[in-house]
Amino acid sequence: MAAEYHKPLPRPLNPELTRPFWEAAKRHELVMPRCKTCDQLFFYPRSECPRCLGSDLEWVGVSGRGRLHSFTIVNQPANAAFRDDVPYVYAVVQLIEGPRMISNLVECDVESVSVDMPVEAVFDDVTPEWTLVKFKPV
Ligand SMILES: [Zn+2]
């Protein structure tokens, strides 16, 4: 955990809706909403299932394993707070359970990153309040 973290932190638009995700991340667990009506797992969190619009939802643990669906290597960050991190990988990860997540690929040589490479979740405790879910190659 960084003693002083000066980058922008998540500011969920609906903190109550996403609280289980962030609490699980602090425990170094990855959870997703699942629709109890049609069994669909989805991400990002919503109050209704994107498949059937059902609102009977639960949070379930997922493996954190997946493949790199798409990525870009960032050399010029949009926010100056990330200036010292470049080049870094902005990633779309396809979890083996189905949902896709936008995150960063870390612990990697950016020149060796390729679409479809296997990845797994890692948990970055950036402050006592916030743990960010990132991914690394496996
Ligand atoms: Zn559904």
Image (tube, helix red, strand yellow):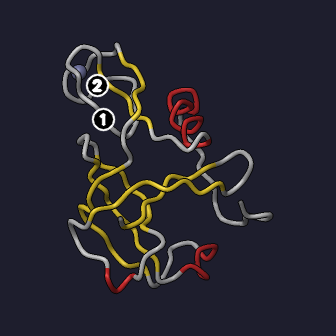
Q: Earlier in the sequence, mark 1 or mark 2?
A: 1
Task: Report which quarter residue 120 is drawn in.
Answer: bottom left
Disc 1 and disc 2: Cα gap in Å?
A: 8 Å
For the residues labelled 1 and 2, say whether their Cβ atoms are less than 8 Å apart: yes
x, y percent for residue 104: 44, 64
Identified at 56% across, 79% down, the residue is 85
Which residue is label 1 attached to? 42
Q: Secondary structure at mark 1?
A: loop
Report the quarter where the N terminus lies: bottom right
Task: Report which quarter residue 70 is drawn in.
Answer: bottom left
Callout 2 crowding tier (Cα within 10 Å): few <14, some 14–19, many ≥20:
many
Identified at 47% across, 83% down, the residue is 87
Q: Is residue 78 left or right of residue 119?
A: right
Q: Is residue 103 left or right of residue 67?
A: right
x, y percent for residue 48: 33, 23
Amino acid type at image mark 1:
Phe
Amino acid type at image mark 2:
Cys
x, y percent for residue 30: 46, 41
Which residue is label 2 attached to? 49
As drawn, the label of residue 68 is none
Q: Quadrant of ligand 1?
A: top left
Q: Disc 2 beta carbon < 8 A from ligand 1?
A: yes
Q: Nearer the viewer, mark 1 or mark 2?
A: 1
Identified at 40% across, 28% down, the residue is 60
Q: Secondary structure at mark 2?
A: loop
Identity of the residue furthest to the front in this view: 138
Above or below, 109 against 127 in this view is below
x, y percent for residue 130: 65, 48
Q: Is residue 115 left or right of residue 4?
A: left
Task: Report which quarter residue 68 is drawn in.
Answer: bottom left
